Image (cartoon, helix red, strand yellow):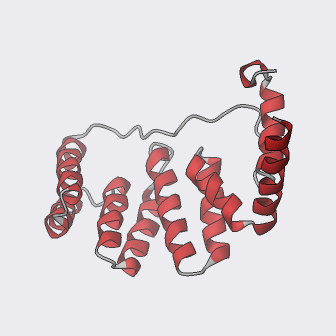
Amino acid sequence: MASSELSAHDRAVLNCVFNPNLPVEESEQAEPTDNEDLTPETLTTKKMELEAIKLAEKGRLREALSMLNRALEIAPRRPSLYNNRAHVYQYLRQFEAALDDLTESINLCTEKHRKTLCHAYCQRGVLHKRAKRTEMAREDFERAARLGSKFAKAQLVELNPYAALCNQMLLQVMEKLG
C-alpha cells in the first residue's frame, strides 16, 4: 500500500510509532503564518527587517543589527524584529542577548504571530540545547512542534535517546523488509 493510500488515522499511528514522544495527530498541521495588521509602522519596519536580513546574509552583521535596532525604535512591539535580531546576535556569538530577544519575542506574540512564535521557540530551544539545558530545550521544542514545526519534532526525537534508539531499530527492520 502506497503512503498516499493511507488514511489520516493510519498516518497518525505511523507518526506515533516513529515519533513516540509527540502527541498523536489526526491531521497534518500546515506551517503557521503571521497575520499582522498593516499599519504604516508595520510596513516601514517590514521593509527595514527585509533589508536587515539581506545585510546579514551578506555577512554585514553590524549593519543588520543597526537596521533592526532602528526598526525596533519605530515598532518596539513587533515580535518578528526581536526574533530576527536574535538571529544576528547568534551569528555574533552573543547568545545571552539572543536568548533575551527570543523571550521578548515570545512574550509579545499574539494569535496573529503564530509563525514568529514557532520560530522563536525553535531558536530558543536550540540555544537551550547548546547550553545543555535539555529540559528547557524540550519544552520549547514541544511548543514549536504543537505549532507545526517539523524541525522541532525532529529535535524532540534527538532529545529522547530511547525514541532515537527505537527509531533506529525500526528503520533497520523496515529496510530489511523493504
Q: Position of 62 compared to 153: left or right?
A: left
Which quadrant holds residue 57?
bottom left
Image position of 29 with respect to 135: above or below: above
In the image, 32 versus 91, the foreground residue is 91
Q: Residue 171: where, in percent of width, then height?
A: 78, 48
Q: Is residue 3 left or right of residue 13?
A: left
Answer left or right for 66 relative to 170: left
From this viewpoint, is residue 149 visible?
A: no
The residue at the point 46 percent across, 38 percent down is 33
Residue 135 to residue 177: above or below: below
**Residue at 61%, 70% in the rendered image:** 137
In this view of the protein, can residue 167 be seen by the observer?
Answer: yes
Q: Residue at x 39, y 78 (%)?
A: 95
Snapshot quadrant of residue 160: bottom right
Which residue occupies 61% across, 79% down?
133
Image position of 66 (left or right of 88): left
Q: Residue furthest top?
A: 5
Which part of the image, by quadrant, shows the C terminus?
top right
The quadrant in which residue 63 appears is bottom left
Q: Nearer the viewer, residue 176 or 13?
A: 176
Which one is nearer the viewer's eye here, 1 or 92?
Answer: 1
Position in image of residue 7 (x %, y %): 80, 23
Percent x, y of residue 150: 59, 47
